[in-house]
Image (cartoon, rainbow, N blue to C red):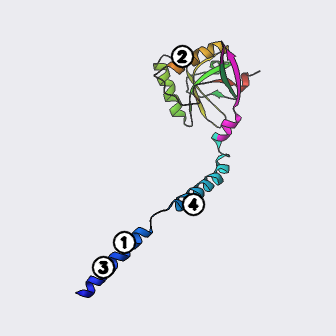
Amino acid sequence: MKSTRTIALAVLILSLASFIGCKPSEKNYRAAYETAMAARDADSTDYDKTVYTRIRRQMKSAKAVVGGDTLAVNTQFVGITPGGGGINESIKRYCVVVGQFKQVFTAKDMRERLVDAGYPGSFVVQTREPYYFVVAGAFHSLAEAASLLKRTESDSSLIMRPPLPFILRPAQLAK
């Protein structure tokens, strides 16, 4: 009986020692964090080669002043997305973009909701890769685009995250 008690006590002591000895320390957390950051940085070179990073890099940004407001105007080559509610003549010099997506069905779905929300001139354009932009409206003048930009910014029915909304200037029209 005494030997089973001794064995049980030894097992209990070893269990407690192993439990107490396995506490992660700040040093261990720091080492794990640095390893994770090094792995992320190593992967970033691969990520930089992805389609969506190239799209962001191809977009050229400039500033324009309209009515005392400074606006970002992004320039990139885009074309009409088939079945996206537009025709080639829909693309004008300044487009107000309220959505950007990797999937065409998501962009088309947002366009349908825009039409229902009172933006009948909305359509979908795409980059060469393709990456899809949902346009709430397109205009020949920057002042008209700025007016719609302000409207979309204050429209609570539109849920957007930065950098949306923004003005897109199709590269093929940027002369």
Query: Residue 31's mark?
Result: 4
Name the mark nearer the viewer: 3 or 2: 3
Report helix, strand or loop for mark 4.
Answer: helix
| Quadrant (top left, top right, bottom left, bottom right) of the C terminus | top right
Separation (CA) of disc 2 from disc 1? 65 Å
Lateral position of residue 107 relative to residue 20, left or right: right
The residue under label 2 is which amino acid type? Answer: Arg
Residue to which mark 1 is pinned: 16
Separation (CA) of disc 4 from disc 1? 25 Å
142 above or below 54?
Answer: above
Q: Are marks 1 and 3 in contact (CB under 8 Å)?
A: no
Q: In this orientation, which residue lies closer to the viewer: 128 or 41?
A: 41
Q: In the current view of this chain or complex, which residue is farthest to the left?
A: 1
Q: Position of residue 88 (x, y in %)?
A: 65, 21
The residue under label 4 is which amino acid type? Answer: Ala
Query: Residue 9's mark?
Result: 3
Q: Which residues are magenta?
A: 53-69
The residue under label 1 is which amino acid type? Answer: Leu
Residue at 65% of width from left, 18% of height from top?
Answer: 89
Res 91 visible: no
Separation (CA) of disc 3 from disc 2? 74 Å
For residue 93, what is the image quadrant?
Answer: top right
Query: Residue 28's mark?
Result: none
